[in-house]
Image (tube, helix red, strand yellow):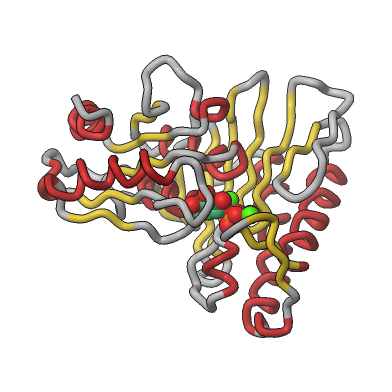
Amino acid sequence: MQGSANLNLMKKAARKVGRALVKDFREVENLQVSAKGPGDFVTRADREAEKTLREELLGGRPTYGFFGEETAETEGADPTRRWIVDPLDGTTNFLHGLPHWAISIALEHKGEIIAGVVFDAAKDEMFWAEKGGGAWMNESRLRVSGRRSLSESIFATEIPAIGKATLPASLQDFARLAPVSAGVRSWGSAALNMAYVAAGRFDGYWARGMRPWDIAAGLVLVREAGGLLSAVREGHDPLINGTILCSNEPLFEGFRKVIRGE
Ligand code: IPD
Ligand code: CA
Ligand code: CA
Ligand code: CA
């Protein structure tokens, strides 16, 4: 399967940054760590990765905007298109030597995400999707899982860290879902959670307190793999509202009811 020129640019940028991050990951003890707030770390690796992504993506598409986690937003001459980028999703895992982190790149057009790449460089798994073109991992087509009952399904979430306002609500969600499901995982990378839902590895995922760069690429991956998604409350846009809930179609309504306590 061949993607568009934009997708090729996104994958090329992700691979370039992936090589640098894998090198940093092997020598992670040499990285200086600073905290933006309690439990919220940033390193040279995050900043350099974003710089490279900015150069590569705007080098290829100079008229697009750029919105990333680590630098101020840049508006492009074309106000309808922007890159939404998380240069390193899962910084805390990275710092602990846990090989579960990813580079996330999304392309937004008129408020809609039309292409996304989530690259797990440590495992060489490139998840990618484009509106209308299906979802893929490397050269394999992806499809959400086929499970139909909550009790057979495993779900991912992110239990927030110290200092996060969303912690009490997330714990309440967890307490509702754990007793009726086959398990809940909190593995520390929002982007990979969504890629794994697209791949049918997780049956569903929900979280609160997400920023656009955490979930933007994941949105198109899940949709193109046949999944459903929404904010936790109906009628809200996950990119604005910061809550996300997604799964395959058979589980979706039941899953959403449990999380909403209905
Ligand atoms: C974090 C991860 C984590 C989520 C946090 C995010 P970062 O992103 O996605 O899974 O629980 O809310 O901030 O800071 O490692 O890019
Ligand atoms: Ca961060
Ligand atoms: Ca993130
Ligand atoms: Ca990040």
**Near-viewer residue (196 or 10):** 196
Q: Is residue 142 above or below residue 4?
A: below
Looking at the picture, how far across and down is residue 74, in whole percent? 84, 35
Q: Residue at x 58, y 67 (%)?
A: 121
Q: Residue at x 52, y 26 (%)?
A: 241
Looking at the picture, how far across and down is residue 229, in whole percent? 38, 30
**Near-viewer residue (132 or 108):** 108
Report how many numbered discs are placed on residues in the image.
Answer: 0
Which residue sits furthest top?
A: 235
**Near-viewer residue (6 or 161):** 161
Looking at the picture, how far across and down is residue 176, in whole percent? 20, 41
**Residue 19 visible:** yes
**Residue 103 visible:** no
Q: Is residue 88 above or below residue 218?
A: below
Q: Is residue 156 left or right of residue 211?
A: left
Q: Is residue 186 left or right of residue 255?
A: right
Q: Residue at x 81, y 48 (%)?
A: 54
Q: Residue at x 13, y 48 (%)?
A: 179
**Near-viewer residue (198 or 187):** 187
Looking at the picture, how far across and down is residue 202, in whole percent? 30, 51
Q: Quadrant of the C terminus?
A: top left
Residue 185: quarter of image: bottom left
Q: Is residue 54 above or below residue 73?
A: below
Q: Is residue 233 above or below residue 147?
A: above
